[in-house]
Image: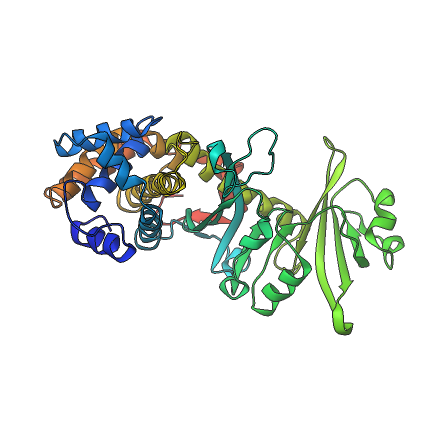
Amino acid sequence: VLGFRPLVARARATGHCRRLRDITPQRLVCALLEALGSLRVTTIADLLRTFNAQTGLSTRYKPFHKRLAQPEFPVFMRQLYLDILRKLSQNVLRAAAPEQLGRFTDILVLDGSSFAVHDALAETCGGRFTKVRPAAVELHACVSVFQDQVLETQLAPDKDAERDFLPAPHELAGKLLLADRGYPSLEYFEQVIAEGGSLPMRAKSNMNPKIRRAGGPGGRLPRLEGHHLRDVMKWLPRRRLDLDVEWERPHGRTLALRMVLVWNPSTRQFMILLTNVGRRILTARQVSELYRLRWQIELVFKEWKSFANLHEFASANRHLVEGLIWASLCAAALKRSLAHASQRTGGRVAISTQRTAKCGIHILHDLLRCILEAFRGLRAVLRNIVQYLLNNATRAHPKRDRARGRLRFGIEYVGVRA
């Protein structure tokens, strides 16, 4: 992925490199990965200093900035990001019980994270809160729980509707999708089910289906059946409920789904989850617990913003800003890949991706310089990285992970002692 020839070929295919000069694609990529993945970057000059320190050159600011400001720069960095995700990812988690989550080939989590950019970009990167910051972007990510890694990321203006970034229904065949209430639509549910996909997705409170069957911890609730949800909302018992509901659809069709309602005493509202997974596979409690796996994507966003310099870059050049956003994601994805590789090939213990993200300054320096030297001594460098992460980045509370962490949802680590 990071070899000289593959990066030159990728840069030429995207139009970012026409002639090889001092700022070669490999030198530029390695400088960006080390700076964004291990240092605090606030200016383009911070990136330039890392570039000169790695290469021993004395490149000036203007030619360096010019390479980052090219329209092809974000295209090149996005393609590199996709290469890292596709070629350096592997399953690190799996279903512990084949009769439950083992029925699915993967569990996907979908959500977005937004942040402000330079106000001068408001025309192309319009935000939702124009009075506060007129320009903002949102990254829409799809995370694989079994790979513990991002599968795909889309960058768009913050004002764009989240529903436009749902995965294609045919991509969800045999998979389970978790998403927040900004994404679902009845039409999308129909398409996913037709393609063999499954979901629990959070629904908006204004949905008003007809209740065909109602049940709770105490048994069946026939008095709710036959009514529309909003008509009986105030009568609902303040506990977990399991309903069969349906909507009338065009051309005389109906859409039947299962609805799990979970009462939140702090907000005094129900959280509404829609799923097509049967009760023999997941109980109402298991559906509501499984939805908590959506928190895994928030941890990815935390790594991006706290440990990969994903923030507002003080530049009004759209191409430069977009390119550095993709470069930040490249650094975060590379560190996750190193954590997973260490877990799979090391001492059979679980590695924390967040702790690994904090170790960027200790694991990226030697690796990237080894890459620049045609991978000379790579085996020794990787051995040192694995040993360092085994000593400094293991998960702190394995027992707590099984009791209250993600392992309680019916998944387990691949190749790690129980």
- The residue at the far bottom in this view is 251
For the C terminus, which image quadrant? top left
Give the percent coordinates (x, y) of residue 139.
48, 44
> How many labels were placed on the picture?
0
Give the image quarter of residue 267: top right
- Colouring mode (rainbow / by chain / secondary structure / one colour): rainbow
**Residue 326 position (above or below residue 105):** above
Q: Locate residue 233 relative to residue 265 in the image: left or right.
A: right
Between residue 265 and residue 188, name the one nearer to us.
188
The percent coordinates of residue 324 (x first, y second) are 35, 39
Please give left or right for residue 158 compared with residue 252 in the image. Answer: left
Q: Is residue 47 above or below residue 377?
A: above
Q: Nearer the viewer, residue 343 or 226?
A: 226
User: Along the line of sight, which residue is nearer the eye, 269 or 301?
Assistant: 301
Q: Is residue 98 visible?
A: no
Image coordinates for residue 343, horizontal then vertical, percent: 32, 43
Residue 235 makes an appearance in the image: yes
Identify the residue at horizontal 76%, vertical 62% (top origin): 246
